[in-house]
Image: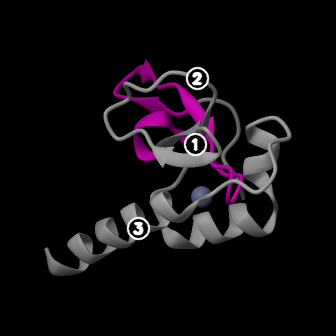
Amino acid sequence: MRPQGKLEYGGQTAPLRTCVGCRVRTVKSELLRLVQVEGVIVPDLRGRLHGRGASLHPTLKCLELAERRRAFSRAFRGTEALDTSRVRVCLEELQREGEAG
Ligand SMILES: [Zn+2]
């Protein structure tokens, strides 16, 4: 079952975003915001980059799902051949940190 509507955190409603990989809606803070800069998708780790964004769980699995589904082309409005290598490197690092600690 996929959660519908709003999740409540301590009585407050948290903003929800949909992961472009697995299409699960979850609280914004659990997703990595991605933006496109000249055909390269970069992770917006500090939430400071402007422009159209896409949200993704910070996992390689969701990145691969998004690539297979061409979700980035859709999210970034028809731009073809987007480079996701920077996102991949970032997620690999996050995964290594997770395993280490
Ligand atoms: Zn996901």
**Crowd tier of the residue under label 1, counting other residues whose Cα lies within 10 Å: few below 14, some 14–19, many 20 or above:** many
Q: Position of residue 81 (x, y in %)?
A: 76, 57
Given this view, does label 1 or label 3 mark the residue nearer the observer? Answer: 3
Q: Is residue 100 above or below residue 53?
A: below
Residue 77: quadrant of the picture: top right
Report the residue at 42% width, 38% height from top.
Answer: 44
> Mark 2 and mark 1: span between their CA atoms?
13 Å
Residue 71 location (% of width, % of height): 77, 52
Based on the displayed image, in which of its 4 quarters is residue 79 positioned? top right
- Mark 2 closeness class: few <14, some 14–19, many ≥20 residues within 10 Å: few
Residue type at mark 3 is Val
| Residue at the far left in the pictured view | 101
Q: Quadrant of the N terminus?
A: bottom right
Residue 81 is one of the magenta-drawn residues: no
- Give the label on residue 100, or none: none
Residue sitting at x 49%, y 46%: 42
Up-down relation of residue 15 to residue 96 (above or below): above
Residue type pointed to by label 2: Gly
Does dot 3 land on a helix, a strand or a loop? helix
Q: What whole-number distance in Å separates the C-alpha atoms at marks 2 and 3?
A: 22 Å
> Most extreme residue toward the right, as rendered?
78
Q: Would residue 12 appear left or right of 2 to someone viewing this image? A: left
Q: Which residues are drawn in magenta?
A: 7-31
Question: Which of the marked residues, 1 or 3, is nearer the chain's N terminus?
Answer: 1
Residue 55 is tagged as 1
Select label 2 or label 1 by which is in front.
Answer: 2
